[in-house]
Image: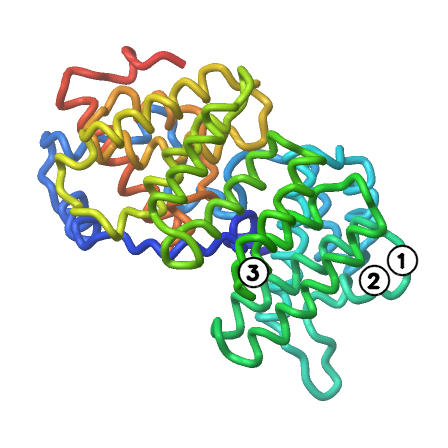
Amino acid sequence: MEILLVLWAALMIGFVLVPFLRRRRGMLQQVPAGHPDAADPANYGFARQEELDVRMPGPDQDLLDVLDLVQRTQDYRAASQLLAGTEAAGERRWQRVQAFAGAASLELQQRPGGVGDAPGGQWLRVWRAEQPKDAGGAAVHAEFLVQQAWRTATPGTDEFRIIMEEAKAACGEAALLAPGDPVPYIVELSVARGLGYTQPEFEQLWLKILDRAPNHMGAHLAALHYWCEKWHGSREQAYGFAEAAAARAPEGSLLAAMPLFAVFEHLPEVNLVTGFYESEVVTKAIHGALHAVHSARPDDPMLAHVRHLLVFFLVRAERWAEAMNQLIHVDGHVGALPWTLSPDPAAEFAVYRALAVAGYEANGGSPASLPH
């Protein structure tokens, strides 16, 4: 089963890692024994690069078991049952909808079908045909269309707009089947970005989400992209949106980490020098995200997403011990930003992990001194 980029395929942040990382990877592969960069992540119990799971940011064994079953048998019923038993307003339902849609999309990409051959993702088509009133199936279908538009068509083309219009209609149908479920409206946030909703149109959609799940982290991340300068807003609007979300976040909410995601969104627009990662705006965003992870529930489905982004920023800021403290929580899974923006997420994650280990040990750290 391959569902690379499943959980965040719809987000599509246009970030490109700087050449420094490519050079640094080569250095890590060539350093002599005894050099700090030769520190071995395996000494900390970290997984080997080839063992890193690129499908998800963190564990969700129920989802993985069901995905394996659905793709092996091409029977959708286990997926339907899992979604039916997943809390509608929670983060996990949104992630599972994305996962099923991503699995079907990648199946279709790998097996487009032809004369005598059924296309990949047939189980989703059967699901919609046999259970047209199933709210979970309708939401997965809507997200599937969104992912198809971003994967297979070029924004601004007729093909892209046609698929997005179909996705918009599917979102409306899914919303009618589950009036209290925010997921169809969260899916539509990507449609809003793709079709260029006006600000009043977007705000009307956003209010529907706030009415149903005001503290939904996944929804806020999806909405953040609309406000970014490369789409329909500006850097100031994006930062303002993120900071407002953090300011009103209840205790224990990961919304306090939103400014860090806003900074990440606009990295291509800033001077990527070492000092930037020690600047006031980045330091403040990092501190907000650290506070968020320290106060969040250990089982919060979005916690791994924040930890992965923290690893990126803490390594860049050369805050080695803090980066290691995040790594011990997320190692083994790399299906999250920023790694999924690379053609090889496991390799990108492994570079940062190796840098963290090397920096940690160069400053006196060791496996024995790292808390678990």
**Quick check: 127 left or right of 247?**
right
Residue 285 % position (x, y): 33, 28
Amino acid at dot 3? Tyr
Question: Which is nearer the eye, 303 or 58?
Answer: 303
Q: Residue at x 19, y 29 (%)?
A: 318
The 10 Å Cα crowd at callout 1, few under 14, some 14 to 19, many 20 or more, is some
Q: Quadrant of residue 302?
A: top right
In this rendering, the answer to whether 28 lies above or below 197 is above
Q: Quadrant of residue 111?
A: bottom right
Question: Which is nearer the eye, 196 or 351?
Answer: 196
Q: Residue at x 56, y 60 (%)?
A: 197
Amino acid at dot 1? Gln
Q: Which residue is mark 1?
A: 131
Q: Which residue is mark 2?
A: 128
- The answer to whether the residue labelled 2 contacts the one labelled 1, judged by CB atoms less than 8 Å apart, is yes
Element assignment for label 2:
helix
The 10 Å Cα crowd at callout 2, few under 14, some 14 to 19, many 20 or more, is some
Q: Residue at x 37, y 39 (%)?
A: 239
Amino acid at dot 2? Arg
The 10 Å Cα crowd at callout 3, few under 14, some 14 to 19, many 20 or more, is some
Residue 12 % position (x, y): 46, 56
